[in-house]
Amino acid sequence: MRNVTLKTVKEVAGIRAASQLAADTLCKVGEMLRAGITTEDINRFVHEDTVRRGAIPAPLNYHGFPKSVCTSVNDVVCHGIPGPYVLKNGDIINVDVTTIFEGFFGDTSATFFIGDVSDEARHVTEVSRKSLDLAIGVVKEGARLGDIGAAIQEYAEGQGCSVVRQFVGHGIGRTFHEEPQVPHYGKRGTGLRLKAGMVFTIEPMINLGTYGVRVLADKWTAVTEDGKLSAQFEHTIVVTKTGCEVLTKRPRPLVGSEVFAG
Ligand code: MF3
Ligand code: CO
Ligand code: CO
């Protein structure tokens, strides 16, 4: 944790600008989602919406990732690769948008419903969204990383879900992934003490079954070991003395297939 930097006001402004572009693109994705489109259609939209504003889609070529956005359907936990898959009624899909603008990164995602989804799908999605809200609620200078993990884990497990261990939130700024790592599980009163100016993501991956994950032969797609559903929401935040600012706050409520305002 020695490499956790405190961002200057100027740097935060840069990350905020990138984050707001990512949030706007994600809102527009919500408006285009429907049964019958492919995940490649989402990729093409995100790519074009990003570059037309002079920004860069961070996933493209990141450690060899082949597309401009991650699209994770049903039992895919994260890092799903867009392609020919046709969205169908009842699917849930996480779309994870990361935008680079003037050298700064902003990272945000949401899980959306395609048409009418099962009660189980609604449950795991709602638990993921609410666990992110609860985690954001405990962030302020002097709080600890373990407080964030505990807030998510206690709530999600209390709702009969599990918290993925294998992927964590992360510091972000002029690079995509930097210190600190932000686990979505843990114990209150432990871990790094937060300071105003730290910028990181919180992005709980919540499973309906067990937390085990495996990565497919494409080296990216992470799926639940038990084949059950997984959902995720992500925001980029900056710690302040009294709380935090959500840099990827939606410019307008998410609409389309997703029922939640968060
Ligand atoms: N956006 C993801 C995150 O929240 C990272 C995606 S890496 C990629 O950290 F290469 F798959 F795009
Ligand atoms: Co992230
Ligand atoms: Co992300």
Image: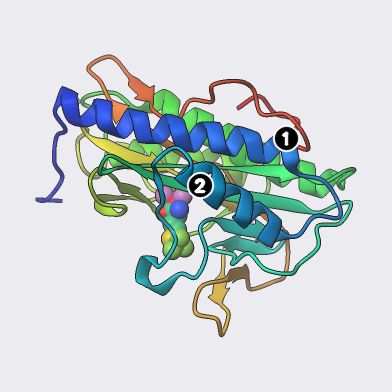
Which residue is pictured at 51% across the width and 47% down the height? 97
The number of numbered discs placed on residues in the rendered structure image is 2
Q: Position of residue 254 (x, y in %)?
A: 66, 29
Q: Is residue 230 left or right of residue 49?
A: right
Colouring rule applied to residues: rainbow
- Residue 139 marker: none
Q: Which residue of the protein is positioned furthest toward the bottom in this rendering?
A: 217
According to the image, label 2 marks what residue?
97
Q: Amino acid at mark 1?
A: Glu
Is any part of residue 234 visible from this angle? yes
According to the image, label 1 marks what residue?
31
Q: Find residue 31 and report its image quarter.
A: top right
Q: Is residue 4 left or right of residue 144?
A: left
Q: Position of residue 110 (x, y in %)?
A: 60, 41
Q: Is residue 96 above or below residue 22?
A: below
Q: Position of residue 134 (x, y in %)?
A: 50, 29
Q: Earlier in the sequence, mark 1 or mark 2?
A: 1
Which residue is pictured at 60% across the width and 20% down the height? 252
Viewer-side residue, 188 vs 58? 58
